[in-house]
Image (cartoon, grey):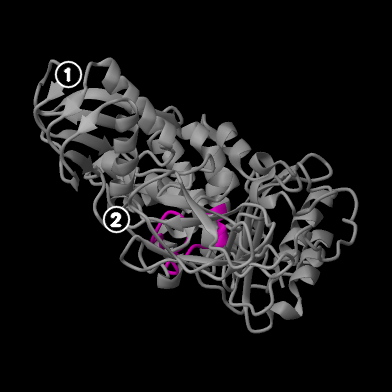
Amino acid sequence: MSRLPRGMIAAVAAVAAAVGGVVTQSVAAPTAVQATALQQRLDGLLNDSRYDGSQVALVVRDATTGETLYDRNGAQRMLPASNTKLFSSTAAMHVLGPSYRFHTDVLAAAPVRGGQLLGNLYLKGYGDPTALESDYAALAEQLKAAGVRRVHGDLIADDTYFDHVRLGDSWAWDDEPFYYNAQISALTLAPDTDYDSGTAIVESRPGAAAGAPVKLDLVPANGVIKLVSTATTGAAGSSNTLNIERDHGTNIVRVTGSVPLGASTGQEWVTVWEPELYAADVFRRALTAQGIAVSGRIKNAATPASATRLARDESMTVGELMTPFLKLSNNMHAETLVKAMGAVVDADGSWPAGLGVVTGYAKSIGVDTSRIRLSDGSGLSRKVNVTADSITDLLIGAQKESWWKQWYDALPIAGNPDRFVGGTLRSRMQNTPAANNLHGKTGSLTGVTSLSGYVTNKDGRKLVFSMISNNYLVSPRSIEDAVGVTLASWSDTASPAAVSTLKTAQATCELEWDKVC
C-alpha cells in the first residue's frame, strides 16, 4: 500500500512533539486515510506478479509544491542504472556551466624554424568526449597554416588531465569490449556523431562469392586496432553469424562467423585499449594528409610546462552536449563530465574527486546525500544506491536553476520517434497522453529498469516521479509505461481512466544502449 502523504506524516509528528515526543495511550490513533483514486490505480499497477520476490519503488510528487501524491518504498535504496545520469548531468550543468567547452591542444617545447620543429609535438587532451576525426584534421590544418612542415621528434599523446583509471568501480568485465563500456581518457576520439568516445567502428561487407573472406574496414582508419578475421561469405539467404570482439588488454579485434552473400554493410562498435594512442594515431594520419611529416614514434607522456600552444580545437558546449548525452544515455559522456568536474574544482581528474562534486551539488539543492551512494556517473556500477525520494528531490530542486529548461529539453521525450528528441523513450508510450509530454530518464541493467522525470497531467498540473525496479526475472518495463500514461491521463476532478500495461513498439529492445533501439 502507499504510505501517508508527507504533509499528514508531519502533522502526526507535530502532535507527538506537543506531548514531549512520546505518543501515549491517551492520544487517539490517527484516523485511517482513504487512498485516493490515483493511489488506488497505481497500487493496482504495482501489485503485479512480476514483483513477487523483487522490489519496486515509486514516488509521485507535485513539481511545484513538492507535495507527495504517491509513495511506495520511496526511502528504500535501489540500484538505479542510468537514472544515475540525473545526478551527473545536473551537477555538470551547474558546476561546469552550460557554456563550458572542452578543448584539445597541440603544443611544442621547441621553436619552429623554417617549418622544422626540432623536438616533440604534444597532443594534449582536456577531456573532450565529442572529438571526431574531423577535429583532429582541423588541428592538422592549423599546424600547416602556422608553417609547420616536419616534426623531428616524437608525437606525444598527453591525457594527464585525468587520472589513468580507465574503467569505473565494479564495471562488469564481460561488458568491456562493447561501445557503452569504453575506457575513459582525457584524450580520446569518437567515430560518429553519437559521440561514442573511445570506440571505433568495424564495417563488414560480404565478399564477391560464397566462401570469400568478409571485407572489413575501420572507421576511422587507424593503425592501432588490428583486425584478425576468419569470417567468410555465406550463401545468399544464409544466417548472419558474424561476431566482432576485442581481446582483453589488447587492440586485437577478432572477427568470426559468416555474412550472407548480398548483405548490406554492417557496423559494429568496439572499444579501444588506451584511447589516447588511438587519437594520436588518427591525428598523425591527419598531419600526413596536410604534408606534415613526423620522424619519431607515438608515445604517451606529460607535456612540459614550458610548451607553447600551436593549435586548439574546442568542443560543443556542455549545454549542447546534454542532448546526445541524455537522449542516447551515453555512459562515456557521464564519466567524462564527472572527471572534468573533479579536474576543474579540485585539480583532480578522478572519479572520487568528481563524484564528491556531484554529491555536493545534489546536497545543495535538497537531496539527503547521507542516504545514497554514487560510485560512477553513468550507472554502470552496481554499487550505486539511490532512492526514489532522492531523485524526486533532485528533479524538484533543479527546476530553480537558470539552465533547467535546456537540461529538461535534453531528456528523452516519450513516444517521439525522432532519435534526438525521443531518445531512449522514442518507442515507448506512443499514441498515448504521455507521448510528447513525459520527459524522463530511462535506466537498464540486467534485473534493473528505471524511469524518472516530469509529466503533465490532464489538468495541466506538472508532476515529478521516480520509479525503480530491481531483481526481477521478467521485465516490468511495461508497468513503467502504464504508470507514465496513468499520470499523464489523471485529472484532479475525475478518476483516471484504467491503463493496462503497455507493449513498446520494439519489444525486443530491453537495453537502452542497443543501437537498433
Q: Which residues are magenta?
A: 373-391
Quadrant, the N terminus: bottom right
x then y, percent, for residue 362: 44, 48
Q: Amino acid at mark 2?
A: Pro
Q: Reply above or below: 28 against 118.
A: below
Mark 1 or 2, closer to the camera: 1
Q: Reply above or below: 498 against 346.
A: below
Q: Amino acid at mark 1?
A: Gly
Q: How many marks?
A: 2
Task: Rate crowding at label 1 as few (under 14), some (14 to 19) or many (20 or more) other CA atoms within 10 Å.
Answer: some
Main secondary-structure element of the magenta-colored stretch: loop
| Mark-to-mark CA distance, 1 and 2 | 44 Å
Q: Residue at x 84, y 44 (%)?
A: 458
Q: Reply above or below: 373 against 332.
A: below
On residue 352, the disc is: 2
Provide the residue designation for mark 1: 115
Q: Secondary structure at mark 2?
A: helix
Q: Residue at x 33, y 27 (%)?
A: 139
x then y, percent, for residue 354: 33, 49
Magenta span contains residue 8: no
87 on left or right of 126: right
- Foreground pick, 131 / 428: 131
Query: Which one is earlier in the sequence, the residue at label 1 or at label 2?
Result: 1
